[in-house]
Image: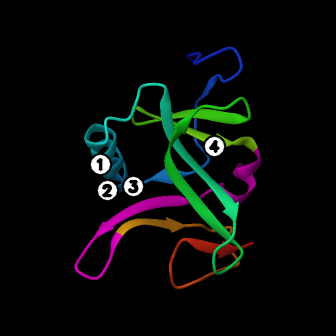
């Protein structure tokens, strides 16, 4: 286990999975957007959206309240309290004529809405 800092050790296995397509798109975004080295991919949830909660996916600095993971060479962070909502989730990326973007397949969601980024537990 490698140390990122004394408050945020890098954990071995993330509670969620990324498909090969999602990982490729994230790596492309890191390169194209020139994401700073002190930032990591943040995955989480927040209140709001059609069904009550929505997903967070973006690049952010690491906070003391985060768990830190490394997924295929990508630093990923998640607020420790969000693991309950995201455990077992799969993040995919689709690029088709009708739909393009990240897709969240969450087994913990009791319902979702048509936008695909909002859910209820």
Q: Earlier along the polypeptide chain: callout 1 or callout 3?
A: 3
x, y percentage for residue 10? 59, 25
* Mark 1 neighbour class, 10 Å CA radius: few under 14, some 14 to 19, many 20 or more: some
Quadrant (top left, top right, bottom left, bottom right) of the N terminus = top right
Q: Earlier along the polypeptide chain: callout 3 or callout 4?
A: 3
Secondary element type, mark 4: strand
Q: What's the magenta region?
A: 81-100
For the residues labelled 3 and 4, the Cα–Cα distance comes to 18 Å
Q: Is residue 81 above or below residue 113?
A: above
Secondary element type, mark 2: helix
* Mark 3 neighbour class, 10 Å CA radius: few under 14, some 14 to 19, many 20 or more: few
Secondary element type, mark 1: helix
* Mark 4 neighbour class, 10 Å CA radius: few under 14, some 14 to 19, many 20 or more: many
x, y percentage for residue 12? 58, 30
Disc number for residue 21: 2
Q: Nearer the viewer, mark 1 or mark 3?
A: 1
Q: Residue at x 61, y 57 (%)?
A: 88
Residue behind mark 3: 19
Residue behind mark 4: 78
Q: Nearer the viewer, mark 3 or mark 4?
A: 4
Q: Are marks 2 and 3 in contact (CB under 8 Å)?
A: yes
26 on left or right of 18 = left
For the residues labelled 1 and 2, the Cα–Cα distance comes to 5 Å
Q: Earlier along the polypeptide chain: callout 4 or callout 1?
A: 1
Asked whether 83 falls inside the magenta stretch, the response is yes
x, y percentage for residue 108? 68, 67
Residue behind mark 1: 24
Secondary element type, mark 3: loop
Q: Earlier along the polypeptide chain: callout 4 or callout 2?
A: 2
Asked whether 28 falls inside the magenta stretch, the response is no
């Amino acid at each position: 286990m490698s140390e990122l800092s004394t408050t945020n050790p890098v954990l071995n296995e993330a509670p969620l999975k990324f498909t090969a397509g999602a990982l490729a798109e994230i790596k492309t975004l890191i390169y194209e957007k020139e994401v700073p080295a002190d930032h990591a991919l943040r995955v989480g949830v927040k209140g709001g959206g059609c069904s009550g909660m929505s997903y967070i996916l973006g690049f952010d600095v690491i906070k003391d309240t985060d768990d830190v993971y490394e997924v295929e060479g990508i630093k990923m962070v998640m607020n420790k309290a969000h693991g309950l909502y995201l455990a077992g989730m799969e993040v995919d990326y689709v690029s088709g004529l009708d739909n393009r973007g990240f897709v969240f397949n969450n087994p913990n969601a009791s319902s979702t809405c048509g936008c695909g980024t909002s859910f209820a537990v």
